[in-house]
Image: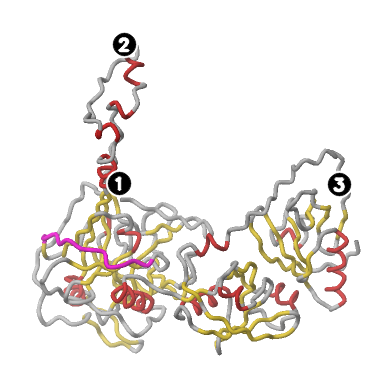
Amino acid sequence: MTTTVRFSRIAPSFVALAAVAATGFGYLIPSHTARADTSAAQTIETPMGRAPLSFADLVERVKPSVVSVSVVNDGGASKLAENKKNDKFDKKGGGNFNLPDLPPDHPLHDFFKNLPKEFGQQEERPKIVQGQGSGFVISSDGYVVTNNHVIDGATKIQVTFDNDDTKYEAKLVGTDQRTDVALLKIDSTKTFPAVTFSTKAPRVGDWALAVGNPFGLGGTVTAGIVSALARDIGSGPYDYMQIDAAVNRGNSGGPTFNLDGEVIGVNTAIFSPSGGNVGIAFDIPAKTVAEVVTQLKATGTVKRGWLGVKIQNVDEDTAASLGLNEAHGALVSEVTANGPAAAAGIKTQDAILQVNDAKVADSRDLARKIAELSPESPVNIKVWRNNSEKMINVKLGLFPKNAEALLNGDNDDNNNSGNNKDDSKPSQTELSQLGVTLMPARTGSNQEGVAIAEVDPSSDAAEKGLKAGDLILEVSGEAVKTPDDVAAGVKKAQGLQRKAVLLHIKSSDQKRFVAVQLSDKKG
C-alpha cells in the first residue's frame, strides 16, 4: 500500500509517510541483546545544558518497543467472494469457467468476447496490496500506536519487533482520521516492553530521536533536533511539531523520543519535492496523541464538540470593515442548517471572539477550542455583531464525520445561461472605490446578488482574489440585488469612517467573506 498525500496549499508538496509497498528489501533485523542497565542517552553537561556523547544507550532502551507494522488490503476480495454466493448464474447450477482466449481474426472471437458475465466471463481479480509502516508499544499488554493512514482499509495487520522475527497478529481498536492516529492491540498474552508519552512539551532546539521502519528497513534510528513547534500543515486545526531527523516513507506511526526516552511525537508527514527526506518532517505532538489514545482505548472512537459553522480568519482589513479595534477571532461565513450554532442564533458575519473565558485568536484556534470540549457541553460564545458584543449560549453537538459535507451543501443554481433570449450586453456600473465593475446578475429563478464584470488588476479587490463572475451577496451585512445597492453599502461604510468594507462573495458554489480596502477614488 503506497499512499501519498499532497497538501497543495504549501508548495512544493507534503507527503504523508504512508506504508510503503512491499519491496525487495525485506527485513534487515540486527541481532543484539540490550544491556539491562541502560536508561537514557549518554550525555555531558555543558553551560547550555545536556549534550549527547552517544545515543547508543537511549536506543537500546527504546528500540525494543518500536514495531514494524505490516498491512494487507485484499482489494475487496472478501466482499467479492460474498457476492459470488448470490450470483444468479451460480444459483442456476452453473459455474464460472475460463473462456477461450481467441485471436481477433477467429470467427468465434466476437461471440465469446460479448458473452455476459452470467455465462462464465471471468471478472477481474482484486489486487492484493501490501504495505508497511511503524508503531510503538504503549502498554505491556500490547497496545500499539500508529498512524491511521498506515492501516486505513487493511484487512490484516501484523506487527514485528526488531529483536524478534515473530509476526504477531494485531486487531484494530480504533482510529481517529482527524489527527491521523490509530490504536492496535497485539493478539498475544505475552508481556511487551513499552514506552511512555512525555508530559513536558519539547522546546525548539531539543534533541529528537526518530525510530521506525523506513522503506521496510526495520529498526532504523535517526537523530536531529526539534526545528519548530505549532506548525500548520493544512490538515485540520491541530498543530504539528517539525523535526529535522531523517524521516521517510514507512516511518509513519513511528515515535520520536527525547533524551529521557519519552515519546514527544509521532511521525506523520514530510515536506518534500521528491517524496524523500529533505530534513523537514512533522510529528503529531505527544499531548495530542495521548488524549486521542485515551478515548480510543475506552470507546474505540473520539468524540468532539461541534459548533456547526464554517469560519475564516479575521485579518486587519476584515476587522476594519466590522469596526473591531483588534484583528482576532473567527468570522462565520456559513452556518450549518439544524446545527448547534443555528439553533442558538449564531449568524453569518458574526465574529466569534471568545469561547467561555478564552479569547479566540483565529479560526484554527476556535476549531481546537470547540474540539476539546465534549458533545452536549453548554458553551458561552462571545460574538461581535452590528458594532457590539453579544453573548450566546450554545449546546454543542457531536462532531460528525460528514461535517464538511454538511457545510458544502449549497445547491443554489448558478447557471447564468438560463432562458434569457435577450442577447444584449447588460449595463455595467464602475465602482472605483472597490476597484470593480458591476452588472446585474442575469435573471433566473434562484439567482441572487450582483455580478462582478471586471476587476481592476491593481486594486485590493484583485489582490484579495475577486474575479469576474463572482457574485456580491451582501455589503456590510446588507443583502444587495443591484449595483446601486452595492454603491449604497460602500457609501454607508465610508460614512462610518471604515477603511474597508466587508463583502459576502459567492464563487461557484463556495461562499466567503472578503474585506476590501476602500479607495479614495470616486465612481
Mark 3 and mark 2: Cα distance apart in space: 64 Å
* Quarter of image, res 28: bottom left
Q: Would you say 509 lies left or right of 162 here?
A: right
User: Which residues are the magenta region?
Assistant: 165-176
Residue hosting label 1: 76
Is the C-beta separation of discs 1 and 3 under 8 Å? no
Using the image, tell me which numbered label, if any, was put on residue 194.
none
Question: Looking at the picture, how far across and down is residue 33, in whole percent?
Answer: 8, 71
Which residue sits at x=86%, y=60%?
431
Using the image, tell me which numbered label, if any, was put on residue 426.
3
Residue 406 counted in the magenta span: no
* Secondary structure state at the residue bearing disc 2: loop
Question: Looking at the picture, how far across and down is residue 67, in whole percent?
Answer: 21, 65
From the viewer's side, name the closer residue of 294 and 319. 294
* Secondary structure state at the residue bearing disc 3: loop
Residue type pointed to by label 2: His
Which sits earlier in the primary sequence, circle 3 or circle 2?
Answer: 2
Mark 2 and mark 1: Cα distance apart in space: 35 Å
From the viewer's side, name the closer residue of 519 and 418. 418
* Secondary structure state at the residue bearing disc 1: loop
Q: Mark 1 or 3, which is nearer the eye? A: 1
